[in-house]
Amino acid sequence: MNKALRNPLIYGLFVLPAFVLFLAFFVYPILSAMNNSFTSWNGISKNITYIGFDNYLTAFQDAAFWKSVRNNVYFILFSCLIQVPLIVIFSLLIANVKRLKGLYKTAVFMPSIMSTAVIGILWGFIYNPDFGLANEILGVFGLPQVYWLSDKNWAMLSILITNAWQWTGFYIVMVLAAIISIPKELDEAAAIDGATGFQRATRITIPLVMPIISVVIMLSMAGAMKAADIVLVMTKGGPAGSTDVMATYMIRYAITSFRHGFGNSIAVLIFVFTIVLTALYQFFVARRTERIEY
Amino acid sequence: MRALKKIVPHIFLMGYLLIILYPFLFVLFSSVKTNNQDIAANPFGLPGSITFDNYVNAWVNAKINTYFFNSLYIGVVSACLSILFAAMLAFAVTRMRYNRISAALFQLILLGMLIPNNSLLLPIYGVMRKLHILDTHMALILPYIANAIPFSVIILAAFMRSLPGEIEEAAVIDGLGSAGLFAKVIIPLTVPAIVTVFIINFLGNWNEFLLANYFLSSDELRTLPVGMVGFRDAYNTNYAQMSAGIVFSVLPVMIIYAILQEKIIEGVTAGSVKG
Amino acid sequence: MKKSFVLLLSLFLLSSIMLAGCGKAANEGAPATNGEQPATNDKPSEPKASEEPFEITIRHTQVGESKKFRLALLEDVVKKTQEAVPGLKIKLDAVDSEVNRKEKLRGEMAAGKPPEIFDVFGSPDAALYAKEGLMLDLTPILEELGLKDKFTTLAPFTHDGKIYGLPIGGSIEGFFYNKAYFEEKGLKVPATLDELEKLAETIKADGKIPFAQSSKDAWIPLMTTNNLWSYYGGPEITYGFKTGETKWTDENMVKAVAKHQEWVQKGYYKKGELGFEYADMRNQIITGEAIMMMDGSWANSVFRDPAQAGDTVGKIGFFNMPPLKAGDPVVVMQDANNGYGFSSAVAEDPRKLQAVKEFIKFMWTEEMQLRGLKEDGVLPAMKMDLEQMKTTSDDPLMQDIFKAVSEIGTSFPAFDALVQAEVNTALSMGIQQIIGGEIDPVKMLENVQAAQDAANAAEPQ
């Protein structure tokens, strides 16, 4: 038995393909980005000058960079404070209805199968100031027109709403699955004891699905740090950079302005921020909900 | 009172459903209207007269068929290979007896979850250049496989760890080696998790825009997301035709989803319960 | 047991072979050019009589309805070139113009692997690529073909005395306007900036939008700003930013930016236009929602095509932005900055070089230039008599444009040809902030000057 499972050749063969790809697409790029982040390379030239921490200092002194960081934070806050409660509420609702459960379960997942690019186009229609759905609805309530994607006060929110529209259903299905897998007896026993639906939800169901909610939060946070597609497709970071997130800021300044070295320093910063954030989350929150396996 | 209690959740859920489905309906209606004025005049209702010209034009202009099959092929191949590689690694790490190396490997891969690798576009572009595969489908397949590895390994490893040790003891007594154990015992048992991982990877690949936009330039190699944005840039004066293009790009996925939805949701379910 | 192991192993091998194979497949075209241009024409392209098929790629930006004539023209040239070079297969690769310029081509240049023939901006892009030895030196080819002195200007494509690209056409920027509306309301083409503003006021009072503009891409509103500052500060001012002789914070610059912002605040543009795409502003003109639009002369093709412009065809005119005082010289952006460049890697393959030569021979002829003018309204990049141009196209809009060309007192190249890319980025950000009303002109220009200083410092002059 031990012999069968201790074959160095097989072990090597099994580990190799994934490991090589991992080295090529994670380890090497991050090391290369770190190296380039200390240069003033324009991305084309063969002369590369090392300039120490200048790129990082430039980023830290640039208000536009902090604006993009703030937008990433908005992404995270929006997912954790608005999306996650909605996910939990709708999962509970779907879990407890008897009729049409299949329909709900199927329909909520639908936006997640569409490509972000198409969603960007679709929501471009909805946010159209002249005939878009969003303004029509406001009109019904007698509210004034909103310039969703062109007003810097609304543009970020518009993107967050679209992003939520795309991914909420995906997470609902995950949480729903966890809720359904809870043994029925627990709930029934509580009902016999006279607990209301609300009490059962908050005292029994939610604590039991906490681990999966924690996973949802982790996934949302990682997604929020990496978000770029949806912003590019909807506003290209505009108007005036007000919807730039770190990743689009990097594209704007690195590729568009021939500042490759600077762009790489932003990539490194995104990596560092994500690590710090995850570490904090693990330290303060996840530890208490133990059952996260990794 | 009881009846009311039963109806209230449905009201909320129906509201949510409306928000989800409305954009689809809007596009469907718009796609059979004659022109922008027609859409602007009556954005939400059914059109007075139905025209299918937009579909014909969009099909010709947007090359949806090419993009669709590119996306499908790249998405499926990458998702399958990443699962194969991730499962092999997960198996080696969780079931074979090299605890020290395994623990280190696993931690390293976990760190990969945190690397925002679409921000590493530039160095990855460099890797692609060195491999001389820019502007080939391989330029997407390789990074897609790699991108999916950390997540897949985590889910599959979690699942494999939870399998009871007796299974393999029995298998080893039956004379299976590591590879046989992997192929004949572990993989079949891991199928629910594999389905989940497949779906998530596939959706990720299907939706991916950034790399696809930068790494491919030939029109006939393009994937659906890039093709759709190009289509928007080229024809954005014509919302009706755009809508028809969107319908083309969404419909096939909808159909696949409708057929497989039980399996897909089962997969996500199985995966998430294991977490 | 054995069987399954073999199966697994072969699966694994198969996949690794696949990966390796694909790595190899693309190996052939490895570009290995260094800074110097190989002396290309001492080796007369010895026709090895090889009919072996080979391929070159042309990256063009003729995407969409509005560019269909240009695409047809290119396709004709491609066809002729293919017929002239045995075995040649030309692959056309269409990319949106902004995407190509700002992202795609830059990425490919960084990777040292641009397509053989590509759409490129003359200044500042071409010079930067040429400096790194990525672009083919066309000087010998042009001499051989006798084309060297045939162009109005090759300055944007010239670096260190060598020519690295050829402009496809020229353009000017000015106002398109709804002639029918002007006639109906008894309005006149303005002779001064004041008159233009009065016009805008009148049009606004009538419930129409005076100026169509789409600012999601910042270069669009910057056409207006650029012309305004060239009036207030003089067209020379832009040349001095890079050398430090002039500053963005100059009081005349402030006046110009403030003027543009004033127009926004007075409601001369449609609200929410910061989120609009380029095509939206043309739509505003076509639907009659807006009356005037600052755009490049290239937009005339849209207004002359019934498929795009519907019944507005024939109703649109063109005039230059008028000067501050009546009788002052008219200052207009005029350049020939958009054209094709060629990869330096071409020089290593005589057959590819031959293909490029043929392409140039067929593309830059008087016939093609006139055809571009006639079908597409692109002003010629090659020297040509104004009278000859006038007789080529009897379209009233084209006649307006020719008239505008003849009225030009001083022309200037667009600002982005004169400043570094990162300054363009800062200015693009700034103009959107100006339009959004979140910054005042002084502060905005200070930001741009800061970017200018940084860019100048990074570049040893």
Image: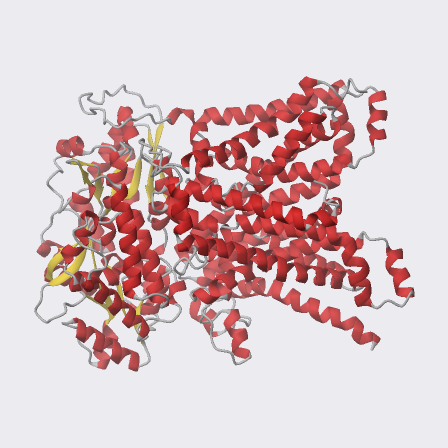
Residue C147 seen from this side: yes
**Viewer-proximal residue among A121 and C330:** C330
**Viewer-proximal residue among C414 and C364:** C414
Classify B9 as above or below C2. Answer: below
- Please state the horizontal and vertical placement of residue C382, each as a whole percent of the image: 15, 46
Q: Is residue C310 left or right of residue A100?
A: left
Classify C232 as above or below C368. Answer: below
* Corner quadrant of residue C133: top left
**Viewer-proximal residue among C75 and B162:** B162
Q: Residue at x 62, y 61 (%)?
A: A81
Residue B61 seen from this side: no
Q: Residue at x 67, y 54 (%)?
A: A171
Q: Name the quarter where the N terminus of chain C is drawn.
A: top right
Q: Is residue B91 left or right of residue C460?
A: right
- What colour scheme governs how the chains and residues are painted in the rendered image of this protein? secondary structure
- Please state the horizontal and vertical placement of residue A103, each as a whole percent of the image: 72, 60
Q: How many marks?
A: 0
Classify C196 as above or below C247. Answer: below
Q: Is residue C140 left or right of residue C14?
A: left
Classify A255 as above or below C446. Answer: above
**Viewer-proximal residue among C66 and A263:** A263
- Please state the horizontal and vertical placement of residue C375, each as a whole percent of the image: 24, 54
- Please state the horizontal and vertical placement of residue B112, each as a whole percent of the image: 58, 37
Q: Residue at x 67, y 38 (%)?
A: B154
Q: Name the quarter where the C terminus of chain C is drawn.
A: top left
